[in-house]
Image (spheres, rainbow, N blue to C red):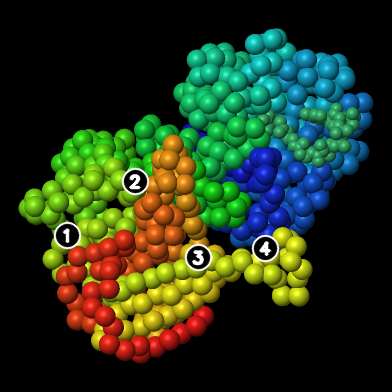
Amino acid sequence: MTFHVYDTTLRDGAQQEGMNLSVADKLAIAPLLDELGVGFIEGGWPGAVPKDTEFFRRAAKELNLKNAVLAAFGATRKAGTRAARDPQVRALVDSDAPVVALVAKSDLRHAERALRTTGEENLAMIADTVSFLVREGRRVVVDAEHFFDGYRFDAAYTRSAVLAAFEAGAEVVALCDTNGGMIPDWVTEIVSEVREHTGDAILGIHAHNDSGCAVANSLAAVGAGATHVQGTVNGYGERTGNADLLAIVANLELKLGRELLADGGLREATRIAHAVSELTNITPYGRQPYVGASAFAHKAGLHASAIKVDPDLYQHIDPTLVGNDMRMLISDMAGRASIELKGRELGFDLTGQGDVLARVTNRVKDSEARGYTYDAADASFELLLREEIDGQLPSYFRIESWRTIVETRPEAGGAEHVDGVVATAEATVKLHTGSERIVSTGEGNGPVNALDHALRQALVRVYPELEEFELIDFKVRILDQSHGTDAVTRVLIETTDGTTSWSTVGVGPNLIEAAWEALTSSTVYGLIHAGVAPAEPTKVCRRPFSLARYPARRPPSRVRVRVRA
Ligand SMILES: CC(=O)SCCNC(=O)CCNC(=O)[C@H](O)C(C)(C)COP(=O)(O)OP(=O)(O)OC[C@H]1O[C@@H](n2cnc3c(N)ncnc32)[C@H](O)[C@@H]1OP(=O)(O)O
Ligand SMILES: CC(=O)C(=O)O
């Protein structure tokens, strides 16, 4: 039996609030959907949306799909006309898409109130439009809009709309939960009843997620005999979205043993979900089933202790089946098993090293109680772990002292008026690297920016890899709001070297001190992962970049370098 996986990311997904796909975006997303292995890609509504007309024009020339066929979406002809003369229907033919999906009213109330026509004329609109498109050589999918709500109001009418479509030559009728309010039991009951009237004809399901049941409703419809499922990557769509096609397919393939996607595409699901997010410019949802970054992330120590024995004990599937990975999150809920597994993930075999595991576990719990958070700062956790493993933390530099000042002065040529005042910051960092003592001064638009400049200036000559590092995110959180300006501050920063990114954390009673800890940790982590050898012999160094604890150990003998940013 053929089973259709029908993707409508580029049409119904694009109806999501805040999404605005260009033709180029659509042309870039379509090959990803094809790689995933779906059978149909609904590209948009040519004739109604100019960008979609252009998409179909360019797709015919530029796309070379190997698994999917393109579907153009449109509506049945207007009441009282002929399909052949309806410009909207004509545009569907002109799109040259081999498949046309027609939205058709199947709820009598909609025919009468939204289309302001009769139920009979609506059936004629369906039959006429479908048969015209079939005569034009198109495969036709009819999206029976508001089917489930309509069925609960007048089952006989909705069935007659479905039968009119099949009798006119539609290949599929997709039953739509347009308002997204169904629950699985209702869907099972209704699809089963419709099946009794439609024999072997292909029924589909198109579900929206307003009741939070879109994926469950799609599975219920398949259970009741639907063999065509529609959905969108990442569940994009109007209001609360469409059914998440990735979750539907993963459930059908992995739980019910169906083979739906071409070329084993499910193993690419996570990569493709994230690539589509990049193109839609919508931040991936971490807790998305199957493909989210947190979908197989374990935080609780008890889970980790069982996972150490067998990952299946706390996971519903092997994450690699959808191209995802198991991750251990380190926090105050971690136990020694969590640390051991996280260590393994980071490339450290801690088997049998009970003392290291106990020390790291205790340090994590203690630090988290003081405001650190390691599940959001993997890089800081790795540095902590390295500190506790002999010989694993290279000493790139030793901070002697740092300071920063913020100054306000009248803007050049400005007045003394408050609007004419600018604030600038300057920072001085004194540090030792190799056998050198470096004093570096940096300027910036704020104290953290000035410190960042001063630190880089100090080190970049010795470690030119730092040129590639860029701070891309900076988050500040006040942890004890009852203390006002005395509160403990946590800073999380994200740094990139252009290829990967990493997060570090700093905590202190002072925002700048917390930021400095996160900055220096980020520098050390980046240098380790760039494979840089320290300028002085590697030695175990307990907190070489440790903040709040770096009084100058010995008065400097002389200044070697003075740099001004
Ligand atoms: C459930 C869904 O998500 S369906 C997909 C919806 N997607 C979109 O609406 C995106 C693209 N839409 C558009 O560009 C525009 O809305 C258009 C071009 C389709 C229509 O715009 P306009 O021509 O300005 O029409 P207007 O907004 O005034 O009214 C809609 C018309 O479509 C008719 N219509 C509404 N639903 C349907 C339907 N399911 N089938 C056929 N005709 C319909 C209405 O009766 C009305 O017809 P009228 O002009 O004879 O009164
Ligand atoms: C066709 C469609 O998108 C719907 O009814 O929801």
Q: Amino acid at mark 4?
A: Glu
Q: Are marks 3 and 4 in contact (CB under 8 Å)?
A: no
Q: Nearer the viewer, residue 516 or 247?
A: 516
Measure how far apart labels 4 and 2 are at the Cα level: 53 Å
Identity of the residue drawn at 79% across and 46% down? 49
Regarding residue 260, the answer to whether it shows in the image is: no
- Labels 4 and 1: the sequence-earlier one: 4
Which residue position holds label 2? 371
Q: Residue at x 24, y 64 (%)?
A: 543
- Determine whether the residue tagged by mark 4 lies in a helix, strand or loop: helix
Q: Where does the image place residue 37, in percent across and percent down from the top left?
A: 50, 49
Foreground of the two, 224 or 36? 36
Residue at figure coordinates x 59%, y 40% from the top left: 236
The mark that comes first in sequence, 1 or 3, is 1
Q: Position of residue 54 (x, y in %)?
A: 77, 55
Which badge, 4 or 2, is on the more N-terminal residue?
4
Report helix, strand or loop for mark 2: loop
Instruction: Using residue 247 as the reference point, say whether residue 401 is left or right of it.
Output: left
In the image, taking residue 238 as reference, residue 440 lies left or right, namely left
> Disc 3 on helix, strand or loop?
helix
* Mark-to-mark CA distance, 1 and 3: 32 Å
Q: Which residue is mark 3?
A: 447
Number of other residues with Cα within 10 Å of mark 2, as a class: few under 14, some 14 to 19, many 20 or more:
many
Dot label at residue 62: 4
Q: How far apart are the two marked residues, 4 and 1, measured between alpha carbons? A: 55 Å
